[in-house]
Amino acid sequence: MSTAQFPVLVPQQPAPPILTGQTAIVTGASSGVGQGIAITLAQAGADVVVNFNSSEKGAIATAEAITKLGRRAVICQANVTQEPDVEKLFAKALAEFGRLDILVNNAGKQNDAMLDEMTLAQWNDVLAVNLTSMFLCSREAVKIFKRQGINPAISVAAGKIVCISSIHDLIPWAGHVNYAASKGGALLFLKSLAQEVAIHRIRVNGISPGAIRTPINTPAWSTPAAYDELKKLILYKRIGEPEEVGRCAAWLASDQSDYLIGQTIYLDGGMALYPGFESGG
């Protein structure tokens, strides 16, 4: 059986309509996990601002998929590491939709090297995309959520922020210290922000995915040999799909999870449970 056939074992049901009437911004939504999240939020009833930095073609594809679901979508080019671009992104959301209910901080990047060969530019690049962008986007979202307050006809929360991190906020990763450090920072960022804004009925939670089938990690799953190696790290013995992250994000952004504050869901098929010890060590 080829790896391309494997998803027949993955749940295919769409997200239930739990976000009807809400508007979301998804950063880095032109491909991979971000694209999956944006489309799944639309399946759940949300209108979506599709952010992209360089791939307009991918953002258009995401927006077209959303409109086919009967939801509204706009694309917005913005480098979310840059303050003026972030301000432009949130201004466009309000101009197009009049309100904002959900922010998904998804933009992420790897720029790998061993530490003694890593440049300061590589370090700064990854920290900016994976961590500084969360600060800039969350700051704008919190300002809007505080101004809006609660509209119980839409949600019992004033706003929801979902931070997409990585299993490497928990598991060290040699050769990727900039990436792991940024994800570890993201974990405490979301917890600290959740502690700060819960009093305003703004909820902040996170998802730390394990191996997800995306273009960025194609070499890890595109051949049977590579996929067999990958499955050694996953207790559930299959790779995850972007729409599975999307369904989790939709639930976190909905009133169904209203009492969940400052938590991270490890959506990883058991990767965080030390698969090497599954046979008793």
Image: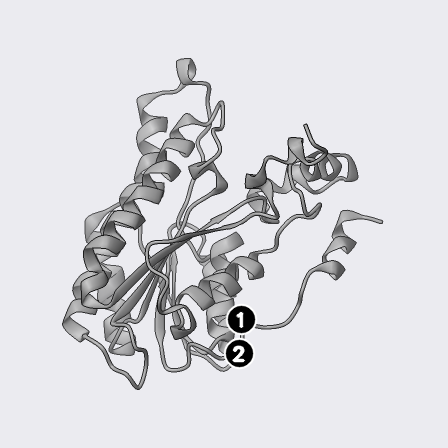
Q: Secondary structure at mark 1?
A: helix
* Crowd rating for badge 2 (residues with CA inside 10 Å; few <14, some 14–19, many 20+): some
Residue at 68% across, 42% down: 221
Please say whether residue 186 is visible from this viewpoint: yes
Amino acid type indicated by mark 1: Ala
Residue 159 screen position, x and y as percent: 28, 68
Residue at 25% across, 81% down: 151
In the displayed structure image, the side of residue 172 where residue 13 appears, left or right: right
Q: Which residue occupies the foreground of this view, 137 or 274?
A: 274
Asked if 141 appears above or below 274 in the picture, the reply is below
In the displayed structure image, the side of residue 252 where residue 270 appears, left or right: right
As drawn, the label of residue 28 is none
Residue topped by disc 2: 69
Residue 278 screen position, x and y as percent: 68, 36
As drawn, the label of residue 65 is 1
Amino acid type indicated by mark 2: Leu
Residue 130 screen position, x and y as percent: 36, 42
Q: Which scheme is used to colour this image of the protein?
A: one colour
Q: Which residue is the extreme one toward the top?
A: 116
In the displayed structure image, the side of residue 185 where residue 198 appears, left or right: left
Q: Secondary structure at mark 2?
A: loop
Q: Quick check: marks 2 and 1 in contact, CB under 8 Å?
A: yes
* Crowd rating for badge 1 (residues with CA inside 10 Å; few <14, some 14–19, many 20+): some
Q: Which residue is the extreme one toward the right?
A: 1
Q: CA distance from mark 2 to mark 1?
A: 7 Å
Of the 4 image quadrants, the one containing the C terminus is top right
Q: Which residue occupies the foreground of this view, 134 or 256?
A: 256
Q: Report how many numbered discs are placed on residues in the image.
A: 2
Residue at 46% across, 43% down: 166
Residue 27 screen position, x and y as percent: 37, 56
